[in-house]
Image: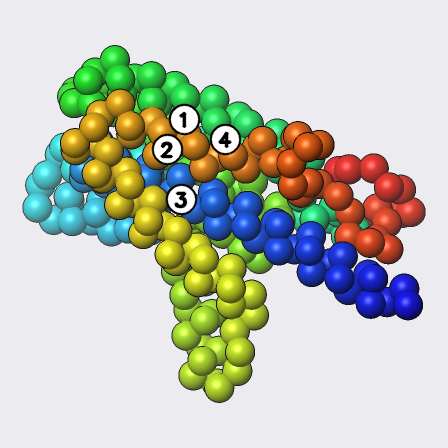
Amino acid sequence: MARPAVADGRARQTTRRDIGVVTLTLTTGAVDAVTFLHLGKVFSSVITGNMALLGVAAGRHNSALAVSGGVALAGYAVGALVAGAIARTPERGQPVWPAPVTAALAVELGVLAALCAGWLATAGRPAGASQLTLLSLAAAAMGMQSAAVRRLGQMSSTYLTSTLTGVVVALAMRQRPTELQRSLGVFAAIVIGAVAGAVAADSAITLAPVAILAPLAAVLACAVSPSLIRFRGRLPGQRGAKGRGRDR
């Protein structure tokens, strides 16, 4: 009887985790939309795309695009470095949602709050130094989110190329893709988030912060509040590394 209970508990915990990852992807879409439309025509999370844009900027002698691409790349790297030190790497026997993931996402929320404050202060039309500052904050936040979610395992809420590749390759092999529901969820979420971010940024400046902050804030609320969905519980029957049951 114990094994079915463990399996059911594992399914519930991983489903809750996956809902959290999909929800985080809404924030990614919103931030990318705002960044591309109003912060220099570059992305905050699609760093490989920004590297290509750096090449385009060099080929077309476009200094503005080169600066924006460089700032986005540097900001993302700094954010990933900071959050990586907080979230660390996956450990055997870790909780389904380790406490360091929540800590790293909380720092990201602070960075995005600063981004939104700057956005409102410039009435949604930043230029010059203010534009580059907001771009660096957006990219840093996405680097933080990438590093935090990486602690959860082989999944992402920001860079989705490998996720799409895995799904397509599995279909080509006539196999059911692993974690198909989560994969489809993040694909839909990044589009929905981008729609919300673009519409808010273009037509209702004060709503852009809502599109950016609300999904991340909801995930953090679920992670820390005992009255909401608990992400941090261990899988039934699971123990921490070396037999210890504390979060890592």
Q: Secondary structure under badge 4? A: helix
Percent x, y of residue 97: 67, 44
State the residue position of label 2. Answer: 212
Can residue 194 be seen? yes
Percent x, y of residue 20: 55, 45
Circles 1 and 3, Cβ within 8 Å, touching? The answer is no
Residue 196, compared with residue 85, is above or below; it is: below
Q: Looking at numbered disc 3 in the image, what kind of residue is underneath it? A: Leu
Q: Determine the residue positioned at 83% across, 37% down.
A: 246
- Whole-Å distance between the Cαs marked 2 and 4? 9 Å
Q: Earlier in the sequence, mark 4 or mark 1?
A: 1
Q: Residues within 10 Å of mark 4 (few under 14, many from 20)?
A: some
Colour scheme employed for the rendering of this structure:
rainbow
Q: Looking at numbered disc 4 in the image, what kind of residue is underneath it? A: Ala
- Whole-Å distance between the Cαs marked 1 and 3? 14 Å
Q: Residues within 10 Å of mark 2 (few under 14, many from 20)?
A: many
Residue mark closest to the camera, 4 vs 1: 4
In the rendered view of the protein, which quadrant contains the N terminus?
Answer: bottom right
State the residue position of label 1. Answer: 112
State the residue position of label 4. Answer: 217
Q: Looking at numbered disc 1 in the image, what kind of residue is underneath it? A: Leu
Q: Residues within 10 Å of mark 3 (few under 14, many from 20)?
A: many
Circles 4 and 3, Cβ within 8 Å, touching? The answer is no
Residue 205, compared with residue 118, is above or below; it is: below
Q: Determine the residue positioned at 51% across, 59% down.
A: 182
- Whole-Å distance between the Cαs marked 4 and 1? 11 Å
Q: Determine the residue positioned at 43% across, 32% down.
A: 214
Tell me if 229 is positioned left or right of 44 in this view: right
